[in-house]
């Protein structure tokens, strides 16, 4: 299986591909969406879950999503059709870092996909290029809650702690106007869902050619979580506006 296929299976029971529960997502969107007639862009949209929820909640909103995964975009199209919002959703299969559009957006999202740009500062720089005057950015990024082990850094990269992350955002010319720090329950629920859903799929397909790969991936991910980064990793979502307006 390709990486995007594994991700789709693992997120089947947790379609928000980040450690947030449904109520946290709802509150963030309420805070971030500027108005019912807004135009949204999700850079690294995956299955489009953030955009779909925004579209359902705002009947005059229009949205665009960008992702490299054809299967994820197909999932988003099918879900949009089921929900009756397909006419207000445009999807682009391309690299989010190189995406251009002929118009600006009132809200630019990038939650859990900052790696596509090489980190948080580059993600915010890219988002600024797409932003309409008075627009907002909703970004989600990991941080270290306490000093990580070398193994954790090897798995998740060179993240900063929470104060340093916020200082860097402000120094880049942004002002937080909302946010959410994932709780331990949200973090654990996400990891149990990711590993458990993928493992269950493998057990349900005992004769399938992908069974061993899926089960091995679930086991390795669970081991890396409980032994590597569980005690040190945190996740932060921020609603941002440009400080200079």
Image: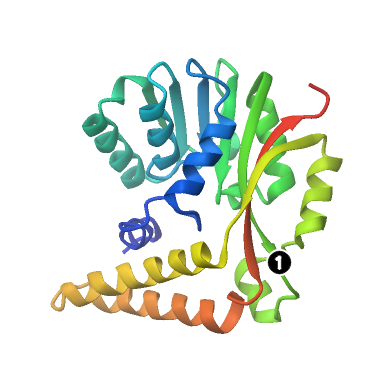
Q: In this image, 21 relative to 96: left or right?
A: left
Q: Quadrant of residue 204?
A: bottom left
In the rendered image, residue 119, in percent from the top left (x then y), is placed at: 68, 51
Residue 111 position (above or below residue 226): above
Residue for badge 1: 144
Quadrant the C terminus occupies: top right
Q: Quadrant of residue 215?
A: bottom left
Residue at coordinates 72% horizontally, 30% vertically from top-left? Answer: 241
Residue 208 position (above or below residue 23): below
Q: Which colour scheme is used?
A: rainbow
Residue at coordinates 53% horizontally, 19% vertically from top-left? Answer: 35
* In the foreground, 59 or 114: 59
Q: In this image, 203 relative to 36: left or right?
A: left
Q: In this image, 16 relative to 117: left or right?
A: left
Q: Which residue lies furthest to the left in this view?
A: 207
Question: How packed is label 1: few (under 14 Cα within 10 Å), some, or many (20 or more)?
Answer: many
Quadrant the N terminus occupies: bottom left
* In the foreground, 44 or 138: 138
Secondary element at image label 1: strand
In the rendered image, residue 243, in percent from the top left (x then y), is placed at: 81, 29
In the rendered image, residue 27, in percent from the top left (x then y), is placed at: 52, 40
Residue at coordinates 38% horizontally, 66% vertically from top-left? Answer: 193
Residue 127 position (above or below residue 154): above
Q: Is residue 93 visible?
A: no
């Amino acid at each position: 299986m390709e990486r995007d296929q594994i991700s789709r299976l693992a997120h089947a029971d947790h379609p928000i591909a980040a450690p947030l529960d449904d109520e946290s997502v709802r509150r963030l969107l309420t805070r971030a969406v500027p108005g019912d007639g807004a135009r949204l862009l999700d850079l690294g949209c995956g299955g489009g879950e953030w955009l779909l929820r925004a579209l359902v909640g705002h009947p005059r909103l229009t949205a665009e999503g960008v992702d490299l995964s054809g299967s994820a975009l197909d999932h988003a199209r099918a879900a949009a059709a089921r929900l009756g919002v397909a006419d207000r959703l445009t999807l682009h299969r391309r690299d989010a870092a190189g995406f251009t559009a002929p118009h600006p957006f009132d809200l630019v999202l990038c939650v859990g996909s900052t790696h596509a740009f090489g980190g948080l500062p580059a993600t915010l720089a890219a988002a600024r290029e797409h932003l309409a005057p008075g627009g907002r950015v909703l970004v989600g990024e990991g941080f270290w809650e306490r000093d990580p082990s070398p193994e954790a850094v090897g798995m998740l990269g060179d993240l900063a702690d929470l104060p340093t992350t916020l200082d860097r955002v402000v120094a880049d010319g942004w002002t937080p106007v909302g946010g959410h720090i994932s709780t331990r329950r949200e973090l654990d629920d996400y990891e149990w869902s990711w590993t458990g859903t993928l493992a269950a799929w493998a057990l349900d397909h005992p004769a399938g050619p992908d069974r061993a790969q899926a089960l091995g991936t679930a086991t390795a991910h669970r081991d890396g979580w409980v032994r590597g980064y569980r005690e040190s990793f945190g996740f932060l979502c921020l609603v941002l506006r440009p400080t200079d307006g």
